[in-house]
C-alpha cells in the first residue's frame, strides 16, 4: 500500500510532532480495519496518539483510503481543539477523496515533484 501526506497535513503534523513512523503505524492499523469512523466516500477518521499521552488525548486524522492500495493523510486536529468536522467539510473531503484516489501513478509523481504531496514509508 502506498501512503501519502498532503502538504497541509505535513505542516499540521509537524506542529503536532506527529512522525512518519506514527503515520505508518496508524496506516497499517487502518488497512487492518482499525479506525474510529468510516465517514463514507472513502473518507475515514483515525486516532493518532499524542507523544506520551496515548490515543485518547491525542489527535484525529482525516484520511482518504482504499484498502491495500492507497492512503492519503489530509487533515489532523487535536481532540481538545474540536469535537469533529462539519458537514460541509465532510462534503469537501469526499469530493477530494474521489480525485486523490483515482490519480494515476504519473499524476502522483507530478504531485510529489511539485511538493503537493509526500510519499512516506519507502
Image (cartoon, helix red, strand yellow):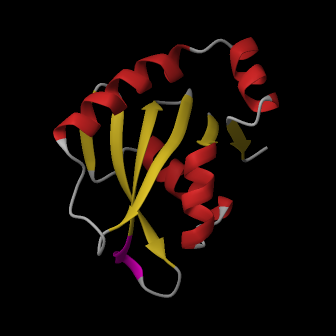
Residue 56 in the magenta stretch? The answer is yes
Q: Write down the region rendered in magenta.
A: 54-58
Can see residue 34? no
| Residue 55 falls left or right of residue 11 | left
Judging depth in this view, the residue of 27 and 85 nearest the camera is: 85
- Where is residue 103, by image quadrant? top right
Q: Split into 4 quadrants, where in the image is the N terminus?
A: top right
Where is residue 82 shown, x and y percent of the image? 25, 65
Q: Is residue 9 above or below residue 117?
A: below
Where is residue 119 shown, x and y percent of the image? 71, 40
Q: Split into 4 quadrants, where in the image is the C terminus?
A: top right
Query: Residue visible at 53% across and 30% down?
Result: 68
Where is residue 97 shown, x and y percent of the image? 42, 26
Furthest-left residue in view? 87
Query: Residue visible at 63% across and 44% down?
Result: 7
Residue 2 in the magenta stretch? The answer is no
Judging depth in this view, the residue of 24 and 43 nearest the camera is: 43
Can see residue 100? yes
Query: Residue visible at 20% across and 45% down?
Result: 86
Where is residue 44 shown, x and y percent of the image? 34, 41
Query: Residue visible at 50% across and 56% down?
Result: 26
Furthest-bottom residue in view? 52
Amino acid at each position: 500500500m502506498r501512503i501519502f501526506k498532503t502538504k497541509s497535513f505535513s505542516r499540521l503534523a509537524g506542529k503536532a510532532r506527529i512522525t512518519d513512523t506514527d503515520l505508518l503505524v496508524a496506516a497499517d492499523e487502518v488497512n487492518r480495519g482499525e479506525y474510529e469512523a468510516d465517514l463514507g466516500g472513502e473518507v475515514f477518521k483515525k486516532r493518532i496518539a499524542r507523544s506520551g499521552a496515548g490515543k485518547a488525548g491525542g489527535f484525529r486524522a482525516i484520511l482518504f483510503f482504499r484498502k491495500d492500495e492507497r492512503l492519503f493523510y489530509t487533515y489532523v486536529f487535536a481532540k481538545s481543539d474540536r469535537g469533529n468536522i462539519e458537514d460541509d467539510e465532510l462534503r469537501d473531503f469526499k469530493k477530494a477523496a474521489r480525485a486523490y484516489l483515482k490519480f494515476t501513478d504519473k499524476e502522483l509523481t507530478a504531485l510529489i515533484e511539485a511538493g503537493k504531496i509526500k510519499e512516506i514509508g519507502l
